[in-house]
Image (spheres, rainbow, N blue to C red):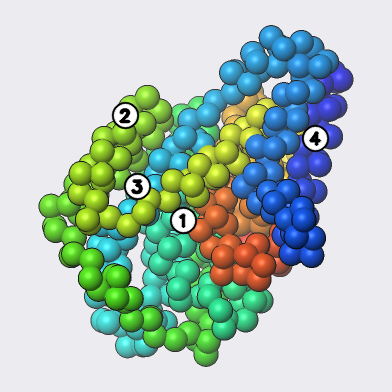
Amino acid sequence: MQTIQLVGAILFGLALLHTFAAKSFEVLSHRHPRHAGLFHLLGEVEVVFGFWAFILIIAMAVLGGGDAAIQYAESRQYTEPLFVFTVMVVAASRPVLDIMERVLLVLAKLLPMRTELALVWFGLALVPLTGSLITEPAAMTLAALMLAPLIFRDGMPEWLKYGALGVLFVNVSIGGTLTAYAAPPVLMVASTWQWDSAFMAAHFGWKAAIAVLINATVITFMLRKHLRAPAAPSADVVAAPAVPLTVTAIHLMFLAAVVVLGHHPVLFLGIFMLFLGFTQAYQRYQNPLIIKEGLLVGFFLAGLVVLGGMQQWWLQPIVESLPPVALFFSALGLTAITDNAALTYLGSLIQGISAQSQYMLVAGAVAGGGLTVIANAPNPAGVSLLRRGFQDESIGAIGLLAGALAPTAVAALAFLL
C-alpha cells in the first residue's frame, strides 16, 4: 500500500461522511446567515465528491508532484458523467416531457382507479422499466420530473416522501437490467463476460420486473390517501404555444441519438450542441433547460470517478475472496459506499470468476443501487431534481437509506429466487 492510496481511502471515507452530513450543513446555513453561502455549498450533495476529488488531486500534487496529479486526473474515464449530464438535459426538455405526460395520462385514464394514483404507479413502475431502453439516467430524469408535483410537495408526510424516493431509486437501479446497455453496472461487464440483452432478460430482467411491480404497488397503496389531483396548469403554461408534432419528433430523435451514441462522448456531445442550437431556434416551445442541475450531477459523478479510482487496492481483494452467496450480500452492502458500476468493473478484472459469482456480483450491485446517493449513477440526478420537495430542500442520507431498505429487500429476494 502506497501513501497516496491510504490518503485516497481516507479522503473517500471523509467524502462518505460528508454525504451523510450534507443535510446538517443545510440546517447550519439557516442558523448562521453570516456564513450561509459556505454552509449551503457544503450542503449540496452534488458538490461533495467533486470537492473531495479536488482535495485528493492537491494531496497527490504535494506528495508526488504536479505532473503525477495531472496525469492521474487525465487518466480517468469521464464518459459516464458527460453522458448523464447530456441525457438529463435532453430528456427534461419540454417536448419530451409533454409527450410522456400525454401518453401516461391516456394510459392512466384506462385504468379503473383515480388518475393521480395511476400516474404515480406508472412513474414508479413503468418509467423505471423503460430505463432498459432509454438508459437509467433518462428514466430517472423523466420519473423525477413527473412525480415531483404528485409526491414530493408540501403536504405529503416526510416519511412517505423518503419511502417513495427509496422505491424510485431501487426500481431505476434494477429496471435497467432487461438489456445489456442501459444499467452502468451491467455495461461494465457485458462485453467481458459476453452478456447480451437476451441473456439479461432471461437471467435478470423478469426478476427485476417482478420486484419493480411489487415495490411500486406497495408504495402507491401507502400514498393513496395523501395524493391529490394534479394542479391545473398555471396561466403561463396555458399561454405557452402547443408543441408541434414535428418539434416533439425531433427532440425524441435527439434523445435516441444520445442514447445510441452513449459510449462515444465526442459524438453525443456534438449531438448535444446541435440540440442546444435547435432549442434556441424554437425557444417558444421550450422551458428553461436544466443545465445547472445537469452540471452539478456531472460534477458529482466526475468526483466519484476520481476518488473511486484510488479504492481498487482494498475493494478488489474483497471481491476476489468471497464465495457466490457471500459475494451477493457483500456487493449489496459495498454498493452503498461505492458506485455499483465501479464494483462490477473490479469483478470483471478477476480471472476465472465462476458464472454463479458473476451473477451474484451484478445482482447484488444492482439490488443495492438505491441505498445511497452514490450507489448508482442516476441517483444524483434524482436528488438534484427532487430535493426541493423535502424539508430544508435537502435529502438526508439516513432518510434515503431507511426508505430504500424494504424495496432493496424485495429486489434481493427476487434475484436470489
Residue at 18 percent across and 65 percent down: it is 242
| Residue nearest the observer in this picture, 235 or 256 | 235
Q: Tag 2, which secondary structure?
A: helix
Q: Residue furthest front?
A: 34
Distance, label 4 to label 3, CA atoms, is 34 Å
**In the shown orientation, is residue 222 left or right of residue 35?**
left
Q: How packed is label 2: few (under 14 Cα within 10 Å), some, or many (20 or more)?
A: few
User: Which residue type carries mark 2?
Assistant: Gly
In the structure shown, which secondary structural element does the residue marked by tag 1 occupy? helix
Q: Residue at x 59, y 73 (%)?
A: 161
Task: Identify which amino acid the numbered label 4 is placed on.
Answer: Leu
Which of pointers 2 and 3 lies earlier in the amino acid sequence? 3
Decide: few, some or many residues near mark 1? Use Cα within 10 Å; few <14, some 14-19, many ≥20.
many
Q: Are the residues at dot 2 and dot 4 in contact (C-beta closer than 8 Å)?
A: no
Which comes sooner in the sequence, label 4 or label 1?
A: 4
Location of the N terminus (image quadrant): top right
SS state under label 3? helix
Indicate the amino acid at tag 1. Answer: Met
From the viewer's side, name the closer residue of 26 and 159.
26
For marks 4 and 1, give the one nearer the viewer.
4
Give how far apart the Cα atoms at labels 2 and 3 are: 13 Å
Residue 6, position in %: x, y?
A: 85, 27
What residue did someone put label 2 on?
270
What residue sits right under mark 3 in the picture?
90
Q: Quadrant of the C terminus?
A: bottom right
Kind of residue indicated by mark 3: Val
Q: CA distance from mark 2 to mark 4?
A: 35 Å
Contact, CB < 8 Å: mark 2 with mark 3? no
Q: Identify the residue at the far bottom of this view.
A: 225
In what element is the residue under mark 4? helix
Q: Which residue is mark 4?
A: 11
On the rendered structure, is 83 left or right of 417? left
